[in-house]
């Protein structure tokens, strides 16, 4: 029974944090030591051990400029010099000069003046009070600029607010919450080479038959599984062989896991329980086009191009204010959320006024539990300006992309029936504006789209791609597997098992429908019986509206045969016929967590216990897994906050939606997965007086190329 002692339980609870989204670089090899004994002790051979096989060399300065290499500039994209950036809007992110100012202020603060080691885990704008932002108009003086800082000093976590103008520093009370801040880039990179300073680790690698020059190690989030893991900032490191392939994820050194102290870089424990399991072969694992053998019988599509003869229809003012068609919103990159959409407004086609839809929306949390319970497992590009662990600002180029999309979809259409005698055929194209952020979180790639439509709908879409997290096995065919043995996944190739897992992406949606005070309404669709003799029909459907009074009324688990619609309405604003204006959530990606609520991963991921939550607005409640999510015990999550059962009727409320995926791997996922996507919609419901795109003009022949039959048809 080989599956009993492989990896420690691999349950990843990751914040979608840009500290993880960096590009690994395989460095040139250094000369090899003369003897095996020399090789085992990196303290005496540091240059070789840390550069021969490392993605990043510790001999390189640990500045963000080296860690985050700038990608080539996209075609037609002008390089922007951020040195002279100034904020124009109260929600604009911190500039380079502001981050430098924060760094200078904090280095003179008593907390940082000692010789104790420190690191800045987050330096972002502390957004002004919502009421002040709502009152602010372009041309007004900018609201006071402050920075929210999460730092570790001498092994303790601190939350601080820095007034950039006055230099005042306020240290916030963090209480007795468990967990640690999200990892820095330096934490991640140092964790890849730290095990090489341990002779036992190097000896184990060589005994496994892996040349150190082919070794690749990656840090994997630990979670929390008991008191033995308290008071130490720990991380698991898993290792792979890069020999013969760029896709080292498919060549795990099975059963080998290193537990590392991130503060001291000390190897706490080495678990090596898979010596009888071969490392999967490199054959057929490389996903690069240059490595593929192309079947001459394959038919490929011709290149396709979509043009905008008159140029794009959107503008970006002051670097962050996006205007397109009838939409306007503030957009900024964020080191943890990826991208934040704020102050989203849509123009009313009747009154011409810009109407509030959403104050703020972003990806709050990512939870990916793996199901192996064995031991151990024409676009506009927007740059992000962030702070490295030492407070130095750096630029993450082309992090967010804004573009228009037309895929041949129809906005609305009608052709009149010939029996009416009216020759009417009307159709409108559906052109949308997409805000896209693609994040590489180790092996997986997440593509997050915010898509705005002219009919007032916002579609939020998540695509999953990249490479599976796999485990090694001695099996090369399913006929070798004993009938009662649970592989915890699917045999994808010889000696490779893709482990069953879930993906949960939780979104924070501060809806402000024509103002901040809104209500959540569950519109339950119930079957009704027709009275005897009244109709030949036996039954019909009735919509029953239930206004949520408190938080527990709005804790929603989807039920296929007890369906509902979920509306956020402004009860004080009504249409001319009396309906409250609102938006509704149109669910999709409805996979729900099936784990026990007292299972350690689910305690931390308790925000996935429901698909929808509604809470009163509280500026301290933004991260569904808690501010200090790493190694937390789950006592500061959305599920805990919502247990207070606070009033939410006609209040400033936040809706939380979790998009869920169950993933049972299949051979088509090997060696790299085709993208799987799902989305949910925020759709107007009695928000407009009529179809808001009724007056949009049709495209005519002079506007766009006309489809013509192919010559060979």
Image (tube, rainbow, N blue to C red):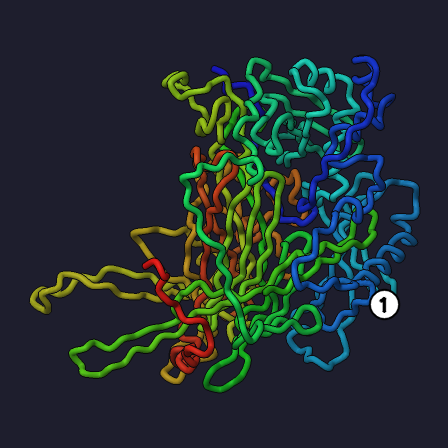
Residue name at image x 50 percent, y 43 percent: 503
Q: How many marks?
A: 1
Q: Nearer the viewer, residue 333 or 70?
A: 70
Outermost residue to the left: 533
588 w.r.t. 42: above or below:
below
Outermost residue to the bottom: 351
Residue name at image x 57 percent, y 62 percent: 435
**Mark 1 sits on what residue?**
165
Query: Is residue 43 rendered to the left or right of residue 260?
Result: right
Residue name at image x 72 percent, y 47 percent: 175
Query: Is residue 660 rendered to the left or right of residue 9?
Result: left
Q: The C terminus is located in which quarter?
A: bottom left
Residue 322, position in %: x, y? 62, 71
Q: Is residue 600 visible?
A: no
702 w.r.t. 631: above or below:
below
Q: Nearer the viewer, residue 280 or 711?
A: 711
Residue 530, position in %: x, y? 15, 64
Q: Nearer the viewer, residue 632 or 482?
A: 482
317 w.r.t. 562: above or below:
below
Q: Is residue 386 visible?
A: yes
Residue 431, position in %: x, y? 47, 69
Question: Dot 1: what SS?
Answer: loop
Residue 468, position in %: x, y? 53, 36
Q: Residues within 10 Å of mark 1 (few under 14, many from 20)?
A: few
Query: Is residue 700 rendered to the left or right of residue 527?
Result: right
């Amino acid at each position: 029974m080989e599956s009993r002692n492989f990896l420690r339980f691999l349950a990843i609870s990751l914040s979608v944090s840009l500290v993880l989204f960096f590009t690994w670089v395989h460095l040139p090899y250094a000369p090899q030591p003369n003897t095996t004994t020399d090789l085992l002790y990196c303290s005496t051979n540091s240059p070789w051990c840390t550069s021969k096989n490392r993605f990043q060399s510790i001999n390189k300065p640990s500045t963000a400029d080296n860690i985050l290499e700038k990608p080539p500039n996209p075609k037609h994209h002008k390089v922007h010099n951020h040195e002279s950036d100034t904020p124009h809007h109260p929600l604009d992110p911190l500039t380079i000069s502001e981050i430098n100012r924060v760094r200078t202020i904090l280095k003179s603060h008593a907390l940082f003046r000692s010789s104790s080691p420190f690191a800045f885990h987050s330096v972002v704008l502390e957004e002004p009070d919502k009421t002040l932002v709502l009152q602010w108009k372009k041309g007004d003086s900018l609201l006071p600029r402050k920075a929210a800082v999460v730092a570790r000093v001498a092994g303790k976590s601190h939350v601080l607010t820095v007034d950039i103008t006055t230099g005042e520093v306020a240290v916030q009370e963090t209480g007795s919450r468990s967990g640690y801040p999200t990892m820095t880039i330096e934490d991640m990179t140092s964790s890849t080479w730290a095990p090489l300073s341990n002779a036992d680790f190097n000896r184990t690698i060589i005994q496994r038959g892996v040349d150190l020059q082919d070794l690749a190690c990656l840090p994997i989030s630990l979670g929390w599984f008991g008191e033995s893991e308290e008071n130490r900032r720990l991380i698991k490191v898993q290792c792979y062989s890069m020999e013969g392939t760029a896709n080292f994820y498919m060549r795990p050194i099975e059963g080998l896991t290193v537990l590392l102290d991130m503060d001291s870089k000390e190897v706490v424990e080495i678990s090596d329980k898979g010596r009888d399991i071969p490392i999967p072969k490199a054959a057929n694992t490389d996903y690069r086009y240059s490595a593929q053998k192309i079947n001459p019988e394959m038919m490929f599509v011709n290149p396709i191009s979509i043009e905008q003869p008159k140029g794009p229809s959107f503008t970006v003012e002051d670097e962050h204010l996006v205007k397109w068609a009838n939409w306007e919103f503030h957009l900024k990159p964020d080191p943890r959320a990826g991208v934040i959409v704020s102050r989203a407004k849509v123009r009313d086609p009747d009154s011409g006024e810009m109407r509030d839809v959403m104050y703020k929306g972003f990806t709050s949390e990512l939870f990916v539990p793996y199901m192996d319970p064995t031991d151990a497992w024409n676009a506009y590009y927007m740059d992000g300006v962030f702070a490295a662990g030492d407070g130095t600002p750096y630029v993450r180029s082309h992090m967010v992309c804004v573009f228009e999309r037309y895929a041949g979809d129809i906005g609305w259409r009608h052709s009149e029936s010939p029996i009416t005698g009216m020759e009417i055929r009307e159709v409108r194209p559906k052109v949308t504006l997409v805000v896209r952020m693609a994040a590489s979180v180790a092996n997986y790639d997440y593509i997050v789209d915010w898509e705005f439509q002219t009919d007032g709908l916002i579609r939020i879409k998540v695509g999953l791609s990249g490479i599976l997290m796999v485990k090694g096995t001695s099996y090369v065919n399913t006929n070798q597997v004993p009938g009662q043995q649970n592989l915890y996944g699917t045999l994808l190739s010889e000696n490779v098992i893709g482990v069953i897992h879930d993906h949960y992406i939780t979104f924070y949606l501060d809806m402000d429908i024509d103002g901040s005070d809104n209500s959540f309404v569950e519109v339950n669709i119930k079957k009704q019986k027709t009275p005897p003799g009244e109709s030949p029909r036996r039954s019909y459907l009735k919509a029953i509206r239930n206004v949520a009074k408190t938080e527990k009324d709005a804790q929603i688990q989807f039920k296929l045969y007890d369906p509902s619609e979920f509306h956020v309405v402004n009860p004080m604003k009504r249409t001319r016929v009396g309906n409250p204006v609102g938006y509704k959530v149109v669910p999709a990606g409805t996979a729900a967590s099936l784990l026990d609520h007292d299972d350690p991963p689910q305690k931390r991921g308790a925000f996935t216990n429901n698909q929808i939550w509604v809470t009163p607005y509280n500026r301290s409640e933004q991260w569904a897994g808690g501010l200090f999510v790493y190694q937390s015990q789950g006592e500061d999550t959305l599920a805990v906050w919502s247990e207070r059962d606070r009033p939410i009727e006609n209040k400033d409320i936040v809706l939380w939606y979790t998009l869920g995926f169950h993933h049972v791997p299949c051979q088509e996922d090997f060696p790299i997965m085709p993208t799987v996507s799902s989305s949910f919609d925020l759709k107007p419901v009695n928000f407009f007086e009529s179809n808001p795109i009724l007056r949009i003009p049709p495209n005519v022949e002079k506007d766009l190329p006309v489809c013509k039959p192919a010559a060979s048809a």
